[in-house]
Amino acid sequence: MDTARLESALREAGLRATRGRVAVLQALADRPHADAEAVFRALLPNLPATSIQNVHNVLGDLTDAGLLRRIEPAGSAALYERRIGDNHHHVVCNSCGAVADIDCVVGHAPCLHPSEAAGYAIDTAEVTFWGVCPSCQERAARALHI
């Protein structure tokens, strides 16, 4: 997405279109499911004066504004992605920690309905599938044939 569109999306969300916010959105376009440290490393070449705390602040602001989605797979740092507005799920590799998107399990959001909702109006279901990614499966298969 070009800079003008990102700036417009920030303004529409009620945020100032700062260089740092635009850079974070651009970094996540290339690195879905990135944690704050990966975003920080991606920003350093063009924003050497930035700090990890600033990146955390921007990620929080963008998440609160609905421009990012934050996920927290068990045993992982918070991960951020730009795919928003749908109720997709994730699959995480037990071996290397790679994360991929999986479209909603059944129909539209929340796509899963609990047997008892305790009076809550459910609008989102978050499901994390766990398994072994294709790269790790291939690596394991090669190790068996050595």
Image: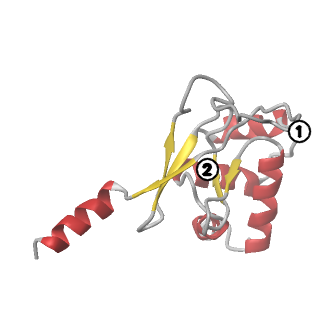
What SS does tag 1 mark?
A: loop
Q: Quadrant of residue 135?
A: bottom left
Taking the spot 58% from the left edge, 59% from the top edge, the residue there is 34
**Rendered-image quadrant of the N terminus:** top right
- Residue at figure coordinates x 48%, y 64% from the top left: 97
With respect to residue 88, does 48 lie above or below?
below
Q: CA distance from mark 2 to mark 1?
A: 18 Å
Q: Is residue 51 visible?
A: no
Q: Which mark is residue 14?
A: 1
Question: Farthest residue in the front direction?
Answer: 115
- Residue 41 coordinates in the image, percent (x, y): 59, 70
Q: Which of the marked residues, 2 or 1, is nearer the chain's N terminus?
A: 1
Task: Name the residue carrying label 2.
Answer: 26
Indicate the quadrant containing the C terminus: top left, top right, bottom left or bottom right. bottom left
Query: Mark 2, residues whose alpha carbon is within 10 Å: few (<14), some, or many (≥20)?
Result: some
Q: Residue furthest top?
A: 107
